Image: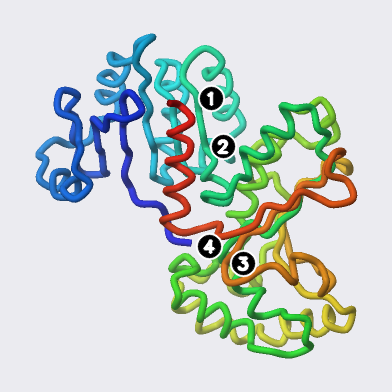
Amino acid sequence: MASAPKIYVAVVGVGLLVSLTSTTRTIFNHANPITSPSSWKSDLAASVDRPDLPKLTEKLSALVSPSQKVALIDNTSSEDVAALYPTWIKAGISVITPNKKAFSGDIALYEQIVAASKTGGRFLNEATVGAGLPVIGTLKDLVATGDKIIKIEGVFSGTMSYIFNEFSTGKPDGPAFSSVVSTAREKGYTEPHPADDLNGFDVARKLTILSRIVSHSPSSSALPKLQSFTSVQTASLIPPELENIPSGDEFISRLPEFDDHFAKMRAAASAEGKVLRFVGVVDVLNGQVRAGLEKYPTTHPFATSLGGSDNIIMFHTERYGERPLIVQGAGAGAAVTAMGVLGDLLKLA
């Protein structure tokens, strides 16, 4: 999916918007908060001030007090911004973000964030997995209330969901894989270079985020400690011959060469009464975290319940044994991502 806009937002008092920062401009005005939803873009574009995150940190830190909460919303996908989370949280500034980098990258950064949050601000990142879907909140509640997580499995990528909902319906034939990927790209469901979706890294990042939450449960001792999302067992769908294709256009033009390969996998699944789905699994019981193409019966919720680019996540736990807890719905898009971010902000109120 397309990257989040390169904008950071600072909020004070959970209701007063005092700062906006893009990669090229910044506004900070504590005395006169930003109130107009129609003019902020033009106001930001007109600013002559350049972004200076250390200076913004100082200004926001000065506003933190026992009676005033300060939150910074990071709507970027920047690793440089994510690296500042421990500094902000230590200063009492809560961080709210859909940015996956800090929570799925190097474990040292993640541990610094967790440690800082014990005495400083909070971090809320519901929108990093499933946009507005209550995935992280649900998992945290399960862990905090003492439920034993056995397995989490799901279709975590809206891009992969669309591709395989269209490609594999349980019938032995259907549209060519390359055709489905090309259509997904035209609809804006993929990154400009589809290899950035087909490599499975987005799913691996989301699994890392969930795995690290599960690791706080006493029953998770068999689960590997992931050093980063690259530690996830990820089965890329990029044909080896296309691994280093530099442009999305060239990748799409070459992908038909491998349609027979994908068609054979579809036919084999159909012969078993199954469909193909690209899923992510956090298997606590067997100590595995993996992402890849798997087969499911045509009666399984992953085959019957998905439409378009929906996400669906199943929580298999001690409490939800025979019938797993299922969270399903749109897992990507500006409106639902904004909902996830705003929902986190309201939790600070």
| Residue tagged 4 | 196
Image vertical order of residue 181 relative to residue 46, above or below: below
For the residue marked with disc 4, what is the amino acid? Answer: Asp
Q: Nearer the viewer, mark 4 or mark 2?
A: 2
Label 2 residue SS:
helix
For the residue marked with disc 3, what is the amino acid? Answer: Met
Tag shown at residue 151: none
Residue at image position (44%, 78%) is: 186
Marked residue nearer the N-terminal end (4 or 2): 2
Residue at image position (81%, 38%) is: 149
Image vertical order of residue 347 relative to residue 272, above or below: above
Mark 3 crowd level (few <14, some 14–19, many ≥20, 10 Å Cα): many
For the residue marked with disc 2, what is the amino acid? Answer: Phe
- State the separation of the CA atoms marked 1 and 4: 27 Å
Label 3 residue SS:
helix
Tag shown at residue 113: 1
Marked residue nearer the N-terminal end (2 or 1): 2
Label 1 residue SS:
helix
Mark 2 crowd level (few <14, some 14–19, many ≥20, 10 Å Cα): many
Marked residue nearer the N-terminal end (3 or 2): 2
Image vertical order of residue 265 relative to residue 292, above or below: below
Label 4 residue SS:
helix
- State the separation of the CA atoms marked 4 and 3: 11 Å
| Residue tagged 3 | 160
Mark 4 crowd level (few <14, some 14–19, many ≥20, 10 Å Cα): some
- State the separation of the CA atoms marked 2 and 1: 9 Å
The answer, for residue 55, to whether it is visible in the render is yes
